[in-house]
Image (spheres, rainbow, N blue to C red):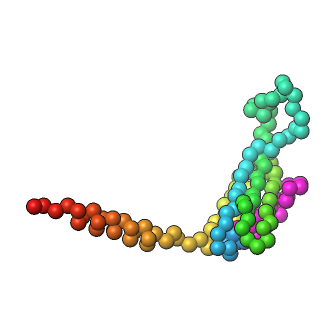
């Protein structure tokens, strides 16, 4: 969604759907980023660094995307919302719940090939040293 930001409730619903779609797929990524939301459209040369010391806390822009989709739809999903500074703590508590619920379908990495290669390397290295 490249248009206007979503409400916080709608953002969490769509974020949960995004995590579920990535979990159901064999592979893929979900990317979430955040930063200060710009409060002014135009800046003058004097105000170039005005946001370094704002008079009041700035709202935070939260973005989420499915990265580069490799599924059959090939559709990139973009989500965004703006969170006011006084609602940040509640937002991140709810975000942690959604994030944890999206992680329950993950599988552990298969490291058996790595262990076999390490054992084979030890075996080959041990045979090379013989005392006469």
Pick whichever, 61 or 88, lies toward us. Answer: 61
Q: Position of residue 61 (x, y in %)?
A: 78, 49
Left or right: 3 with respect to 91? right
Determine the residue positioned at 77% across, 47% down: 60
Pick whichever, 91 or 71, lies toward us. Answer: 71
Determine the residue positioned at 80% across, 59% down: 78
Q: Where does the magenta region start and end?
A: 1-19
User: Is residue 95 among the parts visible in the rendering?
Assistant: no
Left or right: 132 with respect to 11? left
- Name the quadrant of the C terminus: bottom left
User: Is residue 11 among the parts visible in the rendering?
Assistant: yes
Quarter of the image for residue 23 reads bottom right
Determine the residue positioned at 76% across, 43% down: 36
Q: Position of residue 91 (x, y in %)?
A: 74, 56
Outermost residue, bottom side: 24
Establish if 97 lies above or below 62.
below
Q: Position of residue 44 (x, y in %)?
A: 87, 28
Quarter of the image for residue 129 reads bottom left
Tell me the chief SS of the magenta region: helix
- Name the quadrant of the N terminus: bottom right
């Amino acid at each position: 969604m490249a248009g206007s930001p979503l409400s916080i409730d709608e953002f969490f619903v769509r974020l949960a759907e995004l995590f579920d779609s990535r979990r159901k797929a064999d592979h893929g990524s979900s990317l979430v980023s955040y930063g200060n939301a710009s409060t002014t459209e135009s800046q003058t040369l004097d105000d170039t660094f005005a946001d370094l010391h704002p008079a009041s806390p700035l709202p935070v822009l939260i973005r989420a995307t499915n990265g580069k989709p490799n599924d059959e739809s090939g559709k990139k999903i973009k989500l965004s919302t703006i969170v006011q500074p006084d609602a940040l703590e509640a937002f991140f508590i709810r975000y942690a719940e959604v994030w944890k619920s999206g992680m329950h379908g993950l599988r552990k990495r298969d490291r058996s090939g790595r262990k076999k290669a390490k054992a084979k390397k030890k075996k080959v290295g041990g045979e090379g040293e013989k005392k006469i």
